[in-house]
Amino acid sequence: MVPILGFGLASGVIMVRRPAPRRVLPLLHGLNNLVAICLAGYQAYSGWRVLTDFVWL
């Protein structure tokens, strides 16, 4: 997830510091953040499963 989070941060900083009419960068930024949210949800789900299977029995 680190490369995805890094791209989200970099593209967000670019859009804030250099305002201009763009089409591609905001689309990539939004899709990237959607993927990051989905991966974070899956990571939370799989982490919960690991905790219930191995820690809390």
Image: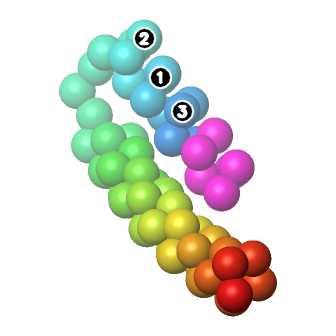
Q: Is residue 44 above or below residue 16?
A: below
Q: Mark 3 sits on what residue?
A: 9
Q: Amino acid at mark 2?
A: Arg
Label 1 to label 2, Cα distance in Å?
A: 5 Å
Q: Position of residue 30 (x, y in %)?
A: 33, 50
Q: Mark 2 sits on what residue?
A: 17
Q: Is residue 42 above or below residue 1?
A: below
Q: Residue at x 37, y 17 (%)?
A: 16
Q: How is the image coloured?
A: rainbow
Q: Position of residue 52 (x, y in %)?
A: 63, 82
Q: Residue 14: which disc?
A: 1
Q: Quadrant of the N terminus?
A: bottom right
Q: Position of residue 20 (x, y in %)?
A: 28, 20
Q: Position of residue 42 (x, y in %)?
A: 51, 74
Boundaries of the magenta span: 1-6
Dominant secondary-structure state across the stretch colored magenta: helix
**Disc 2 on helix, strand or loop?**
helix
CB contact under 8 Å: marks 1 and 2: yes
Q: Residue at x 63, y 40 (%)?
A: 6
